[in-house]
Image (cartoon, rainbow, N blue to C red):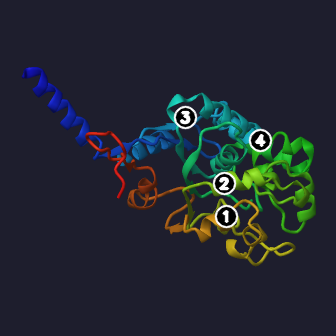
């Protein structure tokens, strides 16, 4: 009788578990911006804040030594290293979310579009990402870096010397010389599928597979020029005065990377918050970032207790 009672209890427990919601923990990674590193107070604290607020495990992915290599390692190589790292992280094997800050967003998109054999990315939250490019190189934070950067720029931002040694050159876009940009820039034209004869449908398919894309623009940002680049907006070719919103650009109207596909499906959130470059108030983090990192419930299929066959509605 005791064995029968135990067996009945087990059956009841199994039946109950088959009918409850199970919380699936989706991890996230964080990619910092230029002149920064995972170990600095800002990025370390931000990663921990997101974990504490969302309840999801998170990791800041470091590329090279962080601060120096974020300036002087080409973005193509940065994206390759990030790809290698996420493929080695077993906790990401079933998929993950991305939060990226500033230049880290160009690495994030490289992960999504270029990473062959990598785990799927579900939600991507972009904080001040220069997605359509910049028309000026970001400000330096130290005299030594500034001297090196200025010296490289003087050599010509689209020269091989600069393209291979200065990360921001990979997304510098001069609207007055778009032909030179398309011919010589080694990162953003490929990432955005801008070169007609080189458009890659796989990049578009991967980007369009995102569940959610959150694009956060900071209203007082003077680092990303033009600021609407954070929403995929940019100057028209040959015009330095006006800025096209994303929806008026060819990247969107011709759907080069799947941005229009995502937007039409209601998966793109264009968010504008007060503050300077990547300086986000906690209440805005809670409102616009945390919901896309929180565990999503998945209903386990209910089974017939006798036959163990799936129950159909």
Which numbered disc, 1 or 4, marks the residue closer to the eye? 1
Q: Is residue 74 visible?
A: no
Residue beneath the point at 75% across and 55% down: 137
Q: Secondary structure at mark 3?
A: loop
Label whose residue precedes the other's in the sequence (1 or 4)? 4
Report the side of 59 relative to 210 (left or right). Answer: left
Q: Secondary structure at mark 1?
A: helix
Name the residue carrying label 1: 259
Name the residue carrying label 2: 207
Q: CA distance from mark 2 to mark 1?
A: 8 Å
Pointer 4 local density, CA inside 10 Å: few below 14, some 14–19, many at least 20: some
Residue beneath the point at 43% across and 38% down: 57
Give the label on residue 52, or none: none
Q: Secondary structure at mark 4?
A: helix
**Identity of the residue furthest to the left in this view:** 1
Which quadrant of the figure has residue 219?
bottom right
Q: Position of residue 155 (x, y in %)?
A: 91, 47
Which numbered disc, 2 or 4, marks the residue closer to the eye? 2
Pointer 2 local density, CA inside 10 Å: few below 14, some 14–19, many at least 20: many
Pointer 3 local density, CA inside 10 Å: few below 14, some 14–19, many at least 20: some
Name the residue carrying label 4: 76
Q: In the picture shown, does residue 289 fall above or below 48?
A: below
Q: Secondary structure at mark 2?
A: helix
Give 200 or 282, whichever is nearer the viewer: 200
């Amino acid at each position: 009788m005791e064995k029968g009672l135990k067996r009945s209890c087990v059956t009841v427990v199994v039946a109950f578990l088959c009918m409850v919601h199970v919380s699936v923990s989706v991890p996230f990674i964080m990619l910092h911006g230029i002149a920064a590193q995972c170990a600095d107070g800002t990025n370390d604290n931000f990663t921990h804040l997101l974990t504490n607020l969302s309840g999801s495990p998170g990791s800041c992915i470091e590329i090279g030594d962080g601060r120096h290599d974020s300036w002087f390692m080409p973005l193509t190589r940065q994206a390759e290293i990030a790809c290698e790292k996420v493929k080695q992280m077993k906790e990401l094997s079933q998929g993950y979310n991305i939060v990226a800050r500033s230049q880290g967003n160009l690495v994030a998109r490289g992960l999504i579009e270029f990473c062959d054999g990598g785990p799927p990315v579900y939600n991507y939250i972009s904080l001040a990402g220069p997605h359509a490019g910049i028309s000026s190189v970001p400000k330096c934070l130290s005299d030594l870096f500034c001297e090196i950067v200025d010296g490289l720029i003087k050599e010509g931002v689209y020269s091989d010397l600069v393209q291979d040694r200065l990360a921001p050159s990979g997304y510098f876009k001069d609207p007055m010389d778009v032909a030179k940009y398309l011919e010589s820039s080694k990162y953003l034209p490929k990432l955005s599928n801008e070169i007609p004869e080189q458009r890659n449908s796989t990049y578009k398919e991967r980007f369009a597979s995102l569940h959610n894309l959150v694009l956060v623009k900071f209203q007082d940002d003077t680092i990303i020029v033009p600021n609407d680049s954070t929403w995929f907006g940019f100057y028209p070719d040959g015009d330095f005065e006006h800025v096209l919103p994303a929806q008026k650009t060819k990247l969107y109207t011709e759907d080069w990377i799947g941005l229009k596909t995502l937007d039409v499906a209601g998966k793109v959130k264009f968010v504008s918050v007060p503050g300077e470059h990547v300086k986000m108030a906690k209440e805005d983090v809670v409102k616009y970032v945390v919901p896309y990192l929180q565990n999503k419930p998945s209903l386990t299929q209910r089974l017939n207790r006798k036959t163990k066959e799936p129950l159909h509605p």
